[in-house]
Image (cartoon, helix red, strand yellow):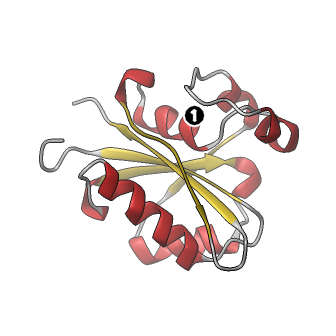
């Protein structure tokens, strides 16, 4: 990846996932594609997570505004790793991949990191996907 390539993050998480776990999974995912926190210009999730304290706290730490999409908008995005389990709980087969692609305004060809998962020490799961934002 070229330096200073702007990226969008899509984040999904269990209820009650702490900000520290979200920070961990985001930094891991960024490292996988050679990006850094400074390259992040868009962050998105599903509207069901708009009141998630850990997600809000992490975004605040980074100075990020999060865009929250309704399940119907996310469900219309083609992704490489749809999940029936995610669909059962959220109404869309993808949160992190679809949110990253929507926030980046692009398609699967620009997905740099697919559905990177992390289980925190408390057993709560977080998932991050990263999409390149076309210049």
In this picture, is 58 found above or below 77? below
Residue depicted at 68% across the width and 71% down the height? 17
Residue depicted at 73% across the width and 72% down the height? 123
Q: Position of residue 54 (x, y in %)?
A: 63, 74
Residue lying at the far right in this picture: please name it: 88
Q: Position of residue 126 (x, y in %)?
A: 62, 60
Q: Quadrant of the N terminus?
A: top left
- Crowding at dot 1, Cα within 10 Å, few <14 / some 14-19 / many 20+, comes out as many
In this picture, is 18 found above or below 67? below
Q: Is residue 57 left or right of residue 42?
A: right
In this picture, is 125 found above or below 98? below
Q: Is residue 59 in sight in this rendering?
A: no
Q: Position of residue 86 (x, y in %)?
A: 77, 41
Q: Which residue is mark 1?
A: 98
In this picture, is 82 found above or below 7? above
Q: Is residue 107 left or right of residue 5?
A: right
In which quarter of the view is residue 51 placed? bottom right
Q: Quadrant of the C terminus?
A: top left
Q: Position of residue 14 (x, y in %)?
A: 74, 61
In which quarter of the view is residue 28 placed? bottom left
Residue lying at the far left in this picture: please name it: 3
Residue depicted at 27% across the width and 60% down the height? 36
Label 1: which secondary element: helix
- Choose between 10 and 121: the one closer to the eye: 121
Q: Is residue 38 left or right of residue 100?
A: left
């Amino acid at each position: 990846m070229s330096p200073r390539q702007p990226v969008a993050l899509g984040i999904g998480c269990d209820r009650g996932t702490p900000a520290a776990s979200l920070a961990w999974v985001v930094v891991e995912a960024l490292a996988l594609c050679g990006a850094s926190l400074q390259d992040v210009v868009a962050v998105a999730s599903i509207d069901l997570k708009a009141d998630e304290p850990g997600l809000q706290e992490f975004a605040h730490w980074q100075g990020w505004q999060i865009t929250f999409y309704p399940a119907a908008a996310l469900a219309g995005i083609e992704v490489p790793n749809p999940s029936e389990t995610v669909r059962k709980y959220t109404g869309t087969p993808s949160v992190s991949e679809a949110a990253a692609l929507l926030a980046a305004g692009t398609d699967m060809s620009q997905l740099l990191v697919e559905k990177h998962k992390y289980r925190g020490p408390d057993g709560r799961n977080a998932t991050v996907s990263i999409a390149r934002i076309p210049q």
